Every structure is written in C-alpha cells, then in structure tokens.
Amino acid sequence: MSDSSRSAAVGGSFPPTRHSLLADLRADEPDVRARALDALARLYWRPVYKHLRRRLGLSTHDAEDTTQAFFAHALTADVFESYDPRQARFRTFFRVCLDRFAANEYRAAGRQKRGGHIQHVPIDVEGAERELERAGVVAVSDPDAEFHREWVRSLFGLSVESLEAWGRETGRQVHFSLFERYDLDEAPGDRPTYQALSDEFGIPVTQVTNYLAAARREFRRIVLARLREVTTTDAEFRAEARDLLGVDVQ
C-alpha cells in the first residue's frame, strides 16, 4: 500500500483509551498477561524471526526455535519490566530484549538443554522464508530500521487479513476485493480507473467510490485498534499512528 493510499484510508477518531500494554504484561492474572503477550506475538513473530535470520545469522531451525523460546520466556519472566517509554519506542526496546535473549540465554543454555523445539506461538516459517528468499537473507547495516520495516509489514499484513475477514463475515466481499485491487495489488501508476473497476465488478462507478471509502474506513479502524493494542502509552500510540499513517489522530 502506498503512502497516499494509507493516508486516504485514515482519518477520524481513534479507539478509546485502554489499559496500558505494560500493565497487562505485568498483571497478576495469568490470562491477562497471556492475552497481552499473544497480541505482541501475533505482530512481532515475523520481525523477530527475520531479525534472527538476517542479523544473527541463525539457521531456519534455530531461528524458529529461538523465536518460540523468546516468547515463552517473555510469558514467564519480567522481560519488559525495565522499559521506560521516555527513553525509546517500545518496538525498539523489544528488539534490544530479543538481542539480549539471543546472546545471553539461547547461546548460553543451548537448544538441547531447554528441551528442544518449543511450540508456543503459531508461526509460518515457510511463508517467512519465501519472503526472505525474495528479499535476500543478507546482513543489515541498520537493524533497528530493518526491524521497524518488518514491524510495519506485519502490522499491515495482519490488518489486511482482518479486513478480508470483515468483508467475508459481513457480506462485503466486493468491498474488500475493490480495496485489494486498487490499494494493494497495483503500484500507484498502474492502478485501474474507477470506471475500469466498475466494468470489472459490474457495479456503478458511484458504488465503487462508496465501497472503497467504506473499506478504507474499516481498514483505518483495524490498523488503529491493533496499533493501540501494542503500544504502551497514548503518546506512543499517537506518535506511531502519525509515523505509520501520516496523519494526526484526534
């Protein structure tokens, strides 16, 4: 999705204030902690896996095992206890925690000592490897920037999946298909005209306009809701929304 399309898909207000992610991760109730970690895992597993492959040079098997081990460790230990939102974005601190774990825990204890292949987070290794093959598994000079790029890709990918489910569950499959064709499938210069989409889908041009607007509003809602779910303060949420979507949320 291009920057202009992202801006077109965003606007209006953001979801109401929710409990801090950090408070949920530190909660006494195991189910609250587990839900918070699940939200993190769904967004972060792909950036984590690719970072381990690219930055640390781990094999496919070891990167998968370390990814699983890191999230399992985060569920049972106060991994994020020292985070201070005044010092850095949470995603930056998250990557530092990952590097520390990979260096001090994984390499020190060894996979065999931990009991081998840990299964906690559902991850698509084959899909991630295909993406790495297309991009090239190469060392990166700026790990924070690369981690952020993968974080953005993961956030938008999950949001597109949710939008597709929204279309299917509400009978708005055409809304999603139009969004996919116009905002996702083509580069800006190669996009079909609204008239071409009208002819392709057999609906009036005005309906194309309305359906796209509705899909973009829902996509905006999904992105902001998911972003709020994995940020630690309202200030961080606003800053991430501005950087990610190019607008100020009110």
Image: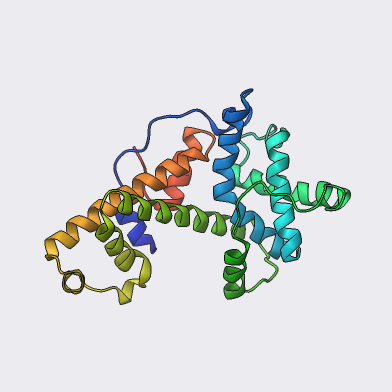
| Residue drawn at 30 percent across, 46 percent down | 11
**Quadrant showing the N terminus:** bottom left
- Residue located farthest toward the top when viewing the structure as drawn: 28
The foreground one among 151 and 118 is 118
Image quarter of residue 224: top left
| Residue drawn at 24 percent across, 58 percent down | 212
Residue 238, horizontal then vertical, whole percent: 44, 40
| 121 to 193, vertically: above or below | above
The foreground one among 191 and 62 is 62
Q: Is residue 89 visible?
A: no
Image quarter of residue 47: bottom right
Side of 99 relative to 35 (left or right): right
Image quarter of residue 201: bottom left
Side of 75 relative to 165 (left or right): right
Residue 29, horizontal then vertical, whole percent: 61, 24
Residue 244, horizontal then vertical, whole percent: 45, 52
Side of 30 relative to 243 (left or right): right
Side of 31 relative to 165 (left or right): right
The foreground one among 109 and 170 is 170
Residue 72, horizontal then vertical, whole percent: 70, 42
| 112 to 226, vertically: above or below | below
Q: Is residue 221 visible?
A: yes
Q: How many marks?
A: 0
